[in-house]
Image (spheres, coloured by chain):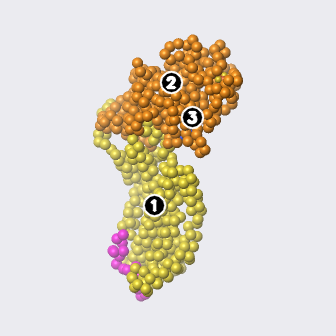
Amino acid sequence: MTKLLEVNNLHTRFKVRNGYLHAVNGVSFSLDKGEMLGVVGESGCGKSVSMMSLIRLLPPAAQITEGEVRIDGEDITHASVSRVNSIRGSKVGMIFQDPMTSLNPFMKIGDQLVEGIVYHKKITKAEALKQAAKYLKMVGISNAEHRLTEYPHQLSGGMRQRVMIAMALLNEPSLVIADEPTTALDVTIQAQIVELVKDLREKLNMSIIWITHDLSLLAGMVDRIMVMYGGYVVEEAVLDDIYNSPLHPYTIGLLKSIPSLKTEAGSRLPSIPGAPPNLFTVPTGCPFAPRCEHKIDRCQTEVPALAAVPGSSGDRPHRVACWVDMRGRGVEQ
Amino acid sequence: MTDQAIPLQQEEKQFSLAKDAFIRLIANRLAIVGMVLVAFLFFVAIFGPYLTPYDFLSQDLMARNQAPSWQHWFGTDDLGRDIMSRVIYGSRTAVIVGFSTVSFSLVIGLFMGALGGYFGGKVDAFVVWLIDITMSIPSLLLVIVINVSLKPPLVNWMDAQFLATGNEFYRNTIWVDFVLVFGSLALIKWPKAARIIRGQILSIRNKNYVLAAEALGVPTSKIVRRYVIPNAIGPIIVYISAALGEAMVLESSFSFLGVGVRPPIPSWGNMISDGLRIWQLYPHVLAAPAAVLAIVTIAFSFLGDGLNDALNPRQWK
Ligand SMILES: Nc1ncnc2c1ncn2[C@@H]1O[C@H](COP(=O)(O)OP(=O)(O)OP(=O)(O)O)[C@@H](O)[C@H]1O
Ligand code: SF4
Ligand SMILES: [Mg+2]
């Protein structure tokens, strides 16, 4: 069976004032139909840029320099602009972080929702609006027909994010990329949106990539987790393996900084010392080395490859990019 | 809520925003007042001079400083000229100066703003620098400088041309006032338009909703038509309304100070300045042009506010 999504050695960089900013440095992963992948990492580690690169939704200064992306086996990196447009309109849906600014204030919700499908599916606007109302109901918006005639400012933040979700689902995509869809919302709404996505995923059987910097949010939601650092994938495994036997020092650090019920009130959460890497130069060793407690000499001179952990089996094993074998030295949770 | 409760629109509504905005505009009483007054002003400026019973220049020394009457609705001035005819002609002066100033500054501003916003980098830095420099020039100072430096040689040159060629065009040097006033105004009033355009282009290009539309595979041409232009056009329309009012007031101020449109061509400004000399004796000489100027200013500000509210759905309640 071909995978829904295959990404091989993807590199994306930005042209900046004097040189390049290397935002994505060789990302490889794959996604099955119906699978849900969580992508985590600190701010600036390249989560958004790598996932936007999948459908080439990048600003003019950005450039994919290497690697390839296949959706349903079709090469996206080398496809024509119009082909990419039609893939965006039919196979991939995006949900963004900030629902307050993701809707055009000058267009009615309905007009905005149907823009894509009217164009790509060649259906009439009335039909499209009916469809839109159906999806608005599905994402839990009451009074959907009326909402279609309203402008974005008439909706609350949580409702707008529901609208954005409906918008992403309307073209019945097989892949939905959600870029920190709950970060801008308050906690109760966050939980509602998470529940909604879980529910929709079951109903519609789509694959989802959920980007977040909050590892704890992914518990009970995703199948696999991919951890990114400095534009590299440093670890990838099924949810339980990441939580129970993390192998990369960075993943371990992230897990330690999650507050748990056992954390005593008032005690300080451990955080990873040091700052995220400077992306203007390509590192010659492990990108995490400057902040790593476990580093050895080799870490400074050779970039560790993302490789299967010995002993893990299957089509997609637990993968980690580290020169030191951290098995048995991880978190005790 | 059933499907029938609120029927879905059946027809394609391309201009739903324009239509909604118009409905909001005419629902706003003050905006209606402003709109009617402004429309009336334009009507008077265009057709008024053909409808007045008196010529704005014809003096009647037997009927000086007459109070308003059936013959002279607004009375006559100290040379016995009909004030209503002069106020009407003054509206033409104001509208000519207003329109020319605004269109010229809009053209320059659109060009500069689009240049900066689109190309960015060094070009943008230069545009911003030019905007800052220009905005720091006091308009009165510039008009005075142009009046004393450019105007005399230009008038002399036109006189010489008339003597040499006999061409009637060169005889009427009154146009020099108009050209100099709106020319200098346009030269310093463009930065506001440039700023609006530049800001709109910069911000809309990076807006999340543009990204969201791109993510839906909406083609670029449609994005420009439906997302960029509607977002940019509201502020421009509001700007035009405000700038028209401002330019007319500036024309009057300059004419009042004697550096704008000069007598005998009527301008509300120079009429007010004439009236000031004798208003204690004949208040009506001052009252008519001053009241008209005040009404026009207020009308434009009502209209501007109404447009601003109508074109900005974020403020709709
Ligand atoms: N338009 C751009 N021009 C230049 N650099 C950019 C641009 N967009 C992103 N970058 C850089 O690319 C790197 C990766 O950014 P990205 O947005 O993918 O991070 P992220 O992991 O999504 O972070 P966050 O959690 O803050 O969203 C960052 O260092 C960022 O500064
Ligand atoms: S490769 Fe070395 S520096 Fe990098 S994470 Fe592993 S131990 Fe740390
Ligand atoms: Mg991001």
Q: Is residue B79 above or below residue B115?
A: below
Chain letter of the orange region: A
Q: Which residue is mark 1?
A: B107
State the separation of the CA atoms marked 1 and 2.
52 Å
Question: Which chain is represented by yellow in the image?
Answer: B
Name the kind of residue labelled 3 in the image.
Ala
Do callouts 1 and 2 mark residues in contact (Cβ within 8 Å)? no
Residue ID for mark 3: A23
User: Which region is colored magenta?
Assistant: B46-62
Query: Is the residue at mark 2 from the same chain as the one at mark 3?
Result: yes
**Three-letter residue code for mark 2:** Phe
x and y percent of residue B76 in the render? 43, 80
Q: Residue at x 65, y 28 (%)?
A: A285
Residue B232 badge: none
Quadrant of the image for the C terminus of chain B? top left
Q: Which residue is mark 2?
A: A29
B192 magenta-colored? no
Read off the chain for label 1: B
Q: Are marks 1 and 3 on the same chain?
A: no
Looking at the image, which residue is at 45% across and 43% down? A105
